[in-house]
C-alpha cells in the first residue's frame, strides 16, 4: 500500500495547487470565482470514493475481481451502476439546455436515449451474461477464430472509448472551469489522476460503487431542482399545466414551445438518429461490461429493469428542469441573463448551464455548490467506467488472447490491465488538453454511430445467427467501423461545420441507417460465401453456444466473498 | 466449450424446447412493440407535427405531444418490467428444471 499513499499525497498536492492557482485567477473573465461550498462537497465526494477504493483494493485479488467485481454485484446495485454509467454530465446539462432553448424537441432526444434499454433487455442482457466472462469480445469470439475477432472487437471498443473520453474530458475541463473556478488544465489533470486511482486500485468493485454513489447524488440533485423549480415557478401549485403556461408566456417561441419544431426535419435523418441512439447503447463496451458483474441471468435482467426506470425518471426530470429554467431564468430581470458580444440576451454560461443556474435560482449557493459537485462526480464516474472498459480491451482481449495466445497467468493479465489504465488515463489527460479549443459536440453522435455500426451488429449476429462465420463477422465489423467514421467525417457536422467546407459530401448528420445496413450486409455476404472448413466448424459449434446462451449451463458463476 | 453429450441431453429435453419457444416469441413480440411505439413516435414527429401540437383539452396549453412523449418513456419501463416478471419466474423455473434433469 506504499504506492497508494504516495499517489494519494500527489493527488492532495495537485488539488491544493489547483485551488490556489484558481484563486489567483479570479479576475479572469471566463472563469467564475472559486465556489467554496462546491469545492467542500466535491472534496467530500473524493474522500468518500477514495475510501471505497481503498476498501475495494483489499478485495480485488483475482482477474475476475478486477474486471467483474467478482460477479457479486446484485441486480439492484448493477441497475444503479448502469444508470450511473449512462447518465453523463453531457446528457444532464445538454438535454436540459436543449429543452430550455427548444422546448418539446428536447423530449425527442430523451426518448431516443432511453428506448435502447428494452431492446438490450429482450435480446442481449441474459445472453451476454451467459456467454461472456469479462468483455463483450468474449461473446463475439466464443465460436470464432480468436485472434482476428478479438482484435476487431478490441479495436471497436477502444475507438468508442477514446471518442467518448475526449468528449467527457473536454466537457469536464470546461464545466469545472466554470463551476469551480479551477484552471482547465488542472481540472483535466485532476479527473485523470482520480480515475487512474479508482480503476488501478479498486478495479470494477470501486468503479461500480463510484457509479452507484454518483447515480444516487445525480438523481437526488435533479429531483430537488426539478420539483423545487416546479414549486417556485407555479407559486406552489405544482401543476405542470401552470408551468407550461408560464413558460410559453416567457419564451420567444410562445406556443411553438409545446410541439416538435425544427430540430428534427428530415424523416430519414430522424430515423437514422433513432437507430444510432437505440442500437448504439447496445454497443457501448463500458455498458456491456456491466452485465458480467452480476452472478446470473436473473440478476442481469433485474439490473436492466432498474436501470431503465432510473434513466427514464432522470429524463423526465431534465424535461421539467428545462421548463423550470425557462420560467425562472429567461425573464430579462431574473439576473441570470447576460448580454453577449453580439448584443443578444443569453443565459449566463450558455444554454448548457440551464440546470446549474436553475439550482442557484431555486436553492441558492448551497444547491449550486451541491449540483456543481454532482456534475464533477458524474464526469469522474463516467470516465472511470470508460477507462476500465478500455483497459480490459487492451489486457484481456489484445494482450492475453491476441499477443500471448491465452498463455498468460491471471496476475500478469491484471498487471497489464493496470498499466493500460495508467496509459489510458494519461492519454485522456493529453486528449483533453489537445481538444480544449475544439467543438466536440459531434463526438457523441460519432460514438453512437460507431457503436451501432461496428459493435452491435457482430454482437447480435454472433448470438442469434447460426450461419455467421469469422469471415462474415470481420467483413461486416470492419465495414461498419470504417463506413460510420467516414460518413461522419464527410457529413455536415465535420466536413461543413468543423472543417469549414461549403457543402457536405455525405448528406446526413447521423449515418447509422446506412452504416448499419452496410455492416449487416457485410456480415451476411461474408458468411454465406464462406465455404471453408473453419466456417463449417463455426456453424456446427453454434449448437453448443446456443445451449449455454439459453440456459446459462457452463457460464461463469459468482465469486464467493 | 461444453461436452457434446451434455449438449445433446439438453437439446433432447422437451422442456428446453418449451423454454426456447416461449422466450423467443415473448422477447421478439415485446421488442416489436417497443420498436413500433418508438418509430411510430418518430414518424409522427417527422410527418405530422400538428397532431402532437394540438391542445390536450380545450383551452389547455399542454399538448397531446406531452403525454405521448412521456408515454414512450414509461412504456419502455413497463415493457422491461413485463419481461423481467415472466422471465425471472416462469423462464427461470424451466431453466432450473432442465438443469436438475440433465446435470
Image (tube, coloured by chain):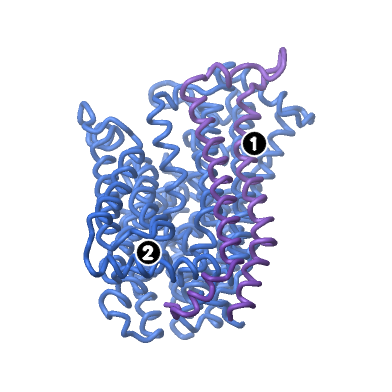
Chain colours: A blue, B purple
In this view of the protein, which residue sits in the foreground, A190 or A415?
A: A415
- Image position, residue B54 (x, y; %): 62, 16
Label annotation for residue A361: 1
Residue found at the very far right of the displayed protein? A237
Question: A433 or A130: nearer the eye?
Answer: A130
In the picture provided, is A345 more to the left or to the right than A154?
right
Which of pointers 1 and 2 indicates the residue nearer the eye? 2
Examine the image and state in which quarter residue A415 appears.
bottom left
C-alpha separation, residue under disc 1 versus residue under disc 2: 50 Å
Give x and y (percent) for residue A90. Answer: 48, 45
Q: What is the chain letter for disc 2?
A: A
Question: Image check: A414 left or right of A370?
Answer: left
Q: Is residue A510 above or below residue A466?
A: above
Can residue A398 be seen? yes
Q: Are marks 1 and 2 on the same chain?
A: yes
Residue A140, label in figure: 2
Percent across and percent down for residue B14 are: 59, 67
User: Splitting the image into 4 quarters, where does residue A532 fall?
Assistant: bottom left
Q: Secondary structure at mark 1?
A: helix
Q: Secondary structure at mark 2?
A: helix
Picture residue at 65% right of the left edge, 72% below the top:
B97
Residue A221, position in %: x, y? 65, 48
Instruction: Name the image quarter holding residue A138.
Output: bottom left
Amino acid at each position: 500500500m506504499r504506492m497508494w499513499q504516495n499517489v494519494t499525497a500527489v493527488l492532495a498536492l495537485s488539488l491544493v495547487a489547483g485551488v490556489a492557482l484558481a484563486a489567483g485567477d479570479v479576475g479572469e473573465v471566463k472563469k467564475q470565482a472559486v465556489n467554496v461550498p462546491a469545492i467542500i462537497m466535491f472534496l467530500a465526494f473524493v474522500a468518500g470514493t477514495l475510501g471505497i477504493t481503498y476498501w475495494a483494493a483489499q478485495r480485488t485479488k483475482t482477474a475476475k475481481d478486477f474486471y467483474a467485481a467478482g460477479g457479486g454485484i446484485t441486480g439492484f446495485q448493477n441497475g444503479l451502476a448502469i444508470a450511473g454509467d449512462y447518465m453523463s454530465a453531457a446528457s444532464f446539462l445538454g438535454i436540459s439546455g436543449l429543452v430550455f432553448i427548444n422546448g418539446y424537441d428536447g423530449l425527442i432526444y430523451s426518448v431516443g436515449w432511453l428506448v435502447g434499454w428494452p431492446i438490450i433487455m429482450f435480446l442481449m442482457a441474459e445472453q451476454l451474461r451467459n456467454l461472456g466472462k469479462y468483455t463483450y469480445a468474449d461473446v463475439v469470439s466464443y465460436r470464432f477464430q480468436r485472434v482476428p475477432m478479438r482484435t476487431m472487437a478490441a479495436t471497436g471498443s477502444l475507438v468508442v472509448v477514446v471518442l467518448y473520453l475526449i468528449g467527457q474530458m473536454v466537457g469536464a475541463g470546461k464545466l469545472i472551469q466554470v463551476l469551480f473556478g479551477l484552471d482547465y488544465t488542472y481540472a483535466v489533470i485532476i479527473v485523470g489522476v482520480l480515475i487512474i486511482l479508482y480503476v488501478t486500485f479498486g478495479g470494477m468493485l470501486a468503479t461500480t460503487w463510484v457509479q452507484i454513489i454518483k447515480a444516487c447524488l445525480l438523481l437526488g440533485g435533479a429531483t430537488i431542482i426539478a420539483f423545487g423549480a416546479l414549486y417556485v415557478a407555479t407559486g406552489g401549485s405544482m401543476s405542470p399545466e401552470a408551468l407550461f403556461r408560464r413558460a410559453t408566456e416567457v419564451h420567444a417561441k410562445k406556443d411553438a414551445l409545446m410541439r416538435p419544431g425544427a430540430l428534427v426535419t428530415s424523416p430519414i435523418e430522424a430515423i437514422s438518429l433513432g437507430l444510432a441512439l437505440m442500437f448504439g447503447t447496445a454497443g457501448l463496451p463500458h455498458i456491456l461490461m456491466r452485465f458480467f458483474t452480476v452472478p446470473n441471468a436473473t440478476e442481469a435482467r433485474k439490473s436492466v429493469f432498474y436501470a431503465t426506470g432510473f434513466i427514464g425518471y432522470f429524463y423526465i426530470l431534465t424535461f421539467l428542469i428545462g421548463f423550470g429554467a425557462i420560467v425562472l431564468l429567461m425573464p430579462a430581470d431574473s439576473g441570470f441573463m447576460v448580454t453577449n458580444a453580439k448584443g443578444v440576451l443569453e443565459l449566463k454560461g450558455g444554454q448548457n448551464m440551464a440546470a446549474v443556474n436553475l439550482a442557484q435560482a431555486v436553492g441558492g449557493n448551497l444547491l449550486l455548490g451541491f449540483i456543481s459537485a454532482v456534475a464533477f462526480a458524474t464526469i469522474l464516474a463516467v470516465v472511470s467506467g470508460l477507462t476500465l472498459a478500455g483497459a480490459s480491451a487492451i489486457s484481456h482481449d489484445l494482450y492475453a488472447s491476441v499477443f500471448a495466445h491465452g498463455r498468460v497467468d491471471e496476475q500478469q493479465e491484471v498487471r497489464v490491465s493496470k498499466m493500460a489504465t495508467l496509459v489510458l488515463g494519461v492519454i485522456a489527460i493529453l486528449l483533453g488538453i489537445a481538444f480544449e479549443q475544439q467543438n466536440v459536440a459531434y463526438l457523441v453522435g460519432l460514438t453512437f454511430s460507431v457503436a451501432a455500426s461496428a459493435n452491435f451488429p457482430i454482437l447480435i449476429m454472433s448470438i442469434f445467427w447460426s450461419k455467421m462465420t469469422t469471415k462474415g463477422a470481420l467483413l461486416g465489423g470492419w465495414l461498419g467501423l470504417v463506413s460510420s467514421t467516414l460518413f461522419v467525417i464527410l457529413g455536415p457536422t465535420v466536413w461543413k461545420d468543423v472543417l469549414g467546407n461549403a457543402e457536405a459530401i455525405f448528406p446526413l448528420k447521423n449515418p447509422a441507417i446506412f452504416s448499419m445496413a452496410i455492416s449487416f450486409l457485410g456480415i451476411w455476404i461474408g458468411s454465406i460465401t464462406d465455404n471453408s472448413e473453419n466456417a463449417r466448424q463455426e456453424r456446427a459449434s453454434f449448437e453448443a453456444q446456443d445451449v449455454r446462451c439459453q440456459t446459462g449451463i457452463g457460464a461463469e458463476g459468482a465469486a464467493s466473498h | 466449450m461444453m461436452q457434446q453429450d451434455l449438449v445433446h441431453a439438453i437439446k433432447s429435453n422437451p422442456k428446453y424446447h418449451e423454454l426456447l419457444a416461449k422466450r423467443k416469441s415473448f422477447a421478439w413480440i415485446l421488442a416489436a412493440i417497443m420498436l413500433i411505439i418508438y418509430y411510430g413516435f418518430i414518424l409522427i414527429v417527422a410527418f405530422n407535427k400538428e397532431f402532437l401540437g394540438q391542445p390536450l383539452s380545450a383551452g389547455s396549453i399542454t399538448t397531446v405531444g406531452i403525454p405521448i412523449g412521456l408515454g414512450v418513456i414509461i412504456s419502455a419501463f413497463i415493457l422491461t418490467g413485463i419481461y423481467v416478471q415472466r422471465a425471472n419466474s416462469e423462464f427461470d423455473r424451466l431453466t432450473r428444471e432442465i438443469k436438475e434433469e440433465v446435470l
